[in-house]
Image (cartoon, rainbow, N blue to C red):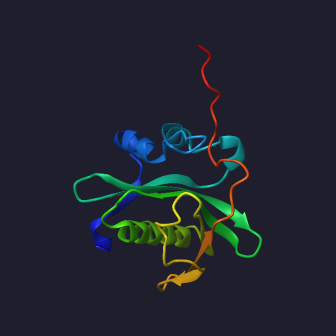
Amino acid sequence: MQGAYTIAGMTPDQVDAADLLVGTMKPPPDLAGWRRDGGDAAVSAGRCQDVRVATNPRGYVQGLCLCRQARHVVHGAILDVPLFVVASAADGPGVASALVADLCAIAGRLDCAAVRIRTGHSPRALHGMDRARRSGGAGIAVILDSSPLGEPPWGVRAPACP
């Protein structure tokens, strides 16, 4: 069912569904703010950032990821994916494959040598992709990185005072 998913940037009407996917994370990302502001402008000046969403033919959100350009010690320019979430119980591998293919296409357009996916939140979604590999004819390395992030890749908002 890999071809059954549409991958695109998150639209305003998908924010609520996307928030349900990532709401249990601590601290939860502010996807509406990420979409509006492009992430933390002070950290990401000059970098391409996006929230990519996988939807099924009925328009239901089946997965999402945050991606941004970064520098890697070995590969140089890479597309960093600090958040990768798949919500499909029926076809998790298909959703994950569609997202990875989209990320590799973006990396190719941005002249990135690799896509680094932080697997901490979705290790099962990427089952079977347990080592760096080359993606099709695009020549983009896929790096699955289970190391934890020091800081969340999104701005953390202070709780409102009562």
Q: Position of residue 45 (x, y in %)?
A: 68, 48
Q: Quadrant of residue 97?
A: bottom left
The quadrant in which the C terminus is found is top right
**Residue, far bottom:** 137
**Residue, far top:** 162
Residue 139 sits above or below residue 49 on the image: below
**Residue, far right:** 73
132 with respect to 19 (left or right): right
Q: Quadrant of residue 52?
A: bottom left
At x 66%, y 42%, the residue is 41
Q: How many marks?
A: 0
Residue 41 sits above or below residue 95 on the image: above
Q: Position of residue 152 (x, y in %)?
A: 65, 47
At x 51%, y 43%, the residue is 24
Residue 133 sits above or below residue 93 on the image: below
The quadrant in which the N terminus is found is bottom left
Q: Nearer the viewer, residue 63 or 7?
A: 63
Q: Position of residue 94 (x, y in %)?
A: 36, 70
Observer able to see residue 112: no
109 with respect to 91 (left or right): right
Observer able to see residue 9: yes
At x 41%, y 43%, the residue is 20
Q: Position of residue 80 (x, y in %)?
A: 62, 62
**Residue, far left:** 58
Q: Quadrant of residue 56?
A: bottom left
